[in-house]
C-alpha cells in the first residue's frame, strides 16, 4: 500500500499573464460557497453556469477552442446599462477572480477608476500607432477601442513575441464599470508569481526569456487549504460584524450625607 506524499511539486510563475489558465475552481467555488451564486446541473454539457443571488449576473464557463471560455453578463440596473466581460481560456484565473471578487464585494464601489493608472505605475509604455499601453516585456497590451470596432470597449491581449501569437484576450464592454476593468489591470501588473500544480502547468511558453519558473516542493495541506482559505476570506465580507453589547449605564452615587 503506497503512502500519499507529504509534498507536491509546484511551479511559481512570472509574469502571471503567461502562467496559463489555472484551476477554474479558484473562481467558481468561491462564487458558489462564499457569495451565494447558484449553479445549474447539466452533467451532459461540459460547461458551468453560475447566477448571482439577485439573478442579474450570469457567469458562463464554456470551453470553446475558437472563442472566449469565460463570459460574464450583467443585466441593466438603475443608471447602468447592461454590460459584459469575457476571457479566453488561457487567461489566468487569478486575474479573472479579481473581477468577480470586486463585483461581489458588498462594500459600496469606490469612485470610477482609471484602468490605465496601474499600467503607468508599473512602467508600461504607450503603444506606438494605436492608443493603449504595452508591458515592459512586450507580451501584453491594453487598449480602449475607438469608433472602428466596438466603441468604448476595453481589450487586454497577451501574446508571444515569436510570431506575435495571441495567448489570450480579455474583453470588457463599453458599459462595464471601470472599477472592474481597473481591478483586472491592477492584477495584471502584480509582480508576484502565481502557483501552478501538476494539473495546471500547461504554460503557453517555457521560453526562459519570457517566463520565470521556480519549482519547489510544497506541503500538500498548504496547496489544498489555499482555496478553502480564499472561500473563508470572501465569505467573511458578507458576515456582519458582531454587535457589541452596550455598556451598562452607571447610576450616579447617592449622596447619603444629611444636612
Image: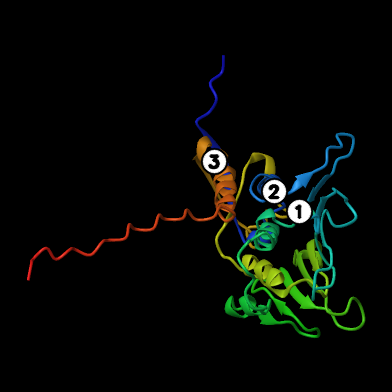
- Per the image, label 2 sits on a secondary structure element best described as loop
Q: Residues within 10 Å of mark 3 (few under 14, many from 20)?
A: few
- Residue that mark 3 sits on: 225
Residue at screen point 64% across, 76% down: 119
Identify which residue, 131 or 256, lies in the foreground: 256
Identify which residue, 131 or 45, lies in the foreground: 45
Comparing labels 3 and 1, the label whose residue is closer to the camera: 1
Label 2 and label 1: CA atoms lie apart by: 7 Å
Where is residue 256 shown, x and y percent of the image?
11, 63
In primary-sequence order, the first of circles 2 and 1 is: 2
Q: Are marks 2 and 1 in contact (CB under 8 Å)?
A: yes
Residue at screen point 53% across, 21% down: 3
Where is residue 257 shown, x and y percent of the image?
8, 66
Q: Residues within 10 Å of mark 2 (few under 14, many from 20)?
A: some
Q: Are marks 3 and 1 in contact (CB under 8 Å)?
A: no
Comparing labels 3 and 2, the label whose residue is closer to the camera: 2
- Residue that mark 1 sits on: 52
Label 3 and label 2: CA atoms lie apart by: 20 Å
Residue at screen point 90% across, 34% down: 44
Label 3 and label 1: CA atoms lie apart by: 25 Å
- Per the image, label 3 sits on a secondary structure element best described as helix
> From the image, which quarter does the N terminus lie in?
top right
- Residue that mark 2 sits on: 36
Amino acid at each position: 500500500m503506497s503512502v500519499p506524499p507529504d509534498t507536491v511539486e509546484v511551479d511559481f510563475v512570472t509574469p502571471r499573464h503567461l502562467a496559463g489558465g489555472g484551476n477554474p475552481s479558484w473562481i467558481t467555488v468561491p462564487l458558489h460557497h462564499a457569495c451565494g451564486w447558484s449553479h445549474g446541473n447539466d452533467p451532459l454539457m461540459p460547461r458551468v453556469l453560475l447566477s448571482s443571488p439577485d439573478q442579474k449576473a450570469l457567469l458562463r464557463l464554456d470551453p470553446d477552442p475558437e472563442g472566449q471560455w469565460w463570459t460574464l453578463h450583467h443585466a441593466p440596473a438603475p443608471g447602468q446599462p447592461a454590460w459584459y466581460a469575457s476571457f479566453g481560456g488561457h487567461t489566468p484565473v487569478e486575474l479573472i477572480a479579481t473581477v468577480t471578487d470586486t463585483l461581489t464585494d458588498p462594500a459600496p464601489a469606490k469612485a470610477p477608476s482609471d484602468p490605465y493608472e496601474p499600467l503607468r505605475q508599473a512602467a508600461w509604455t504607450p503603444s506606438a500607432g494605436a492608443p493603449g499601453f504595452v508591458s515592459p516585456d512586450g507580451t501584453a497590451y491594453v487598449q480602449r477601442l475607438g469608433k472602428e470596432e466596438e466603441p468604448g470597449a476595453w481589450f487586454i491581449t497577451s501574446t508571444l513575441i515569436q510570431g506575435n501569437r495571441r495567448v489570450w484576450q480579455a474583453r470588457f464592454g463599453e458599459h462595464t464599470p471601470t472599477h472592474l476593468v481597473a481591478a483586472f489591470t491592477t492584477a495584471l501588473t502584480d509582480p508576484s508569481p502565481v502557483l501552478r500544480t501538476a494539473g495546471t502547468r500547461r504554460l503557453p511558453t517555457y521560453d526562459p526569456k519570457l517566463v520565470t519558473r521556480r519549482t519547489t516542493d510544497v506541503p500538500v495541506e498548504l496547496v489544498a487549504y489555499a482555496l478553502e482559505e480564499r472561500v473563508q476570506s470572501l465569505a467573511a465580507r458578507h458576515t456582519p460584524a458582531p454587535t457589541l453589547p452596550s455598556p451598562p449605564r452607571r447610576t450616579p452615587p447617592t449622596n447619603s450625607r444629611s444636612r
